[in-house]
Amino acid sequence: MKSDWQRALTALLLATGLGTGLAGFAPELRATGLVAARPAAAETELLYSIVNITEDLGARSACPLDLAAARARIETGLRAQALKPVFSPVAEGPGVLTQEIAAQRIAADRGTICGWTASAHFNGRRGPLRRDRAGHSYSSLEAASHDVPPLLTAHLR
């Protein structure tokens, strides 16, 4: 009878040691593919659109909107907030984030420089107006994207 207890205790200690060892080496095992990776935390999808509201025709022609660069900046800002951005050029209405952007021509020694302002709108709420940092085009869009979580939180109340 004593040997059954010893075998059971030995098996339990071996299983505990093996489990602890596997847990300790889990990152290395995931890297090799021997152990499945943990599923990533679910991100909240957010449909967004970009609207160029530049009224000055001179600024509009001198500073054309680079949609690819603008989308990259917005998506960088939204992903930093654990949101999964989904772009639509025509989406509008409830549940759609609208990024309004406007160009301004700034006279400089080397010619015309384009400065951008942006603000985020979601379900009738507006974030603050953001301006580009010097030398960083569309940085206002990334900054405006950081204003989105408070707008979403207000929507969920």
Image (cartoon, rainbow, N blue to C red):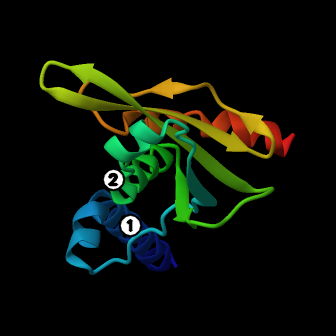
- Mark 2 vs 1: CB contact within 8 A: no
Q: Position of residue 135 (x, y in %)?
A: 23, 28
Residue 109 in view here? yes
Q: Quadrant of residue 45?
A: bottom right
Mark 2 vs mark 1: which is more N-terminal? 1
Q: Which residue is mark 1?
A: 19
Residue 63 in view here? no
Residue type indicated by callout 2: Ala
Relative horizontal placement of residue 145, taking residue 116 as reference (left or right): right
Q: Quadrant of residue 137?
A: top left
Q: Is residue 96 above or below residue 100?
A: below
| Residue depicted at x 79% and y 46% | 123
Spatial separation of the CA atoms under disc 2 and disc 1: 48 Å
Q: Which residue is mark 2?
A: 69
Q: Quadrant of residue 131?
A: top left
Q: Position of residue 134 (x, y in %)?
A: 28, 22
Q: Which residue appears farthest toward the front when viewing the image?
A: 58
| Residue depicted at x 70% and y 56% | 96
Relative horizontal placement of residue 41, taking residue 26 as reference (left or right): right
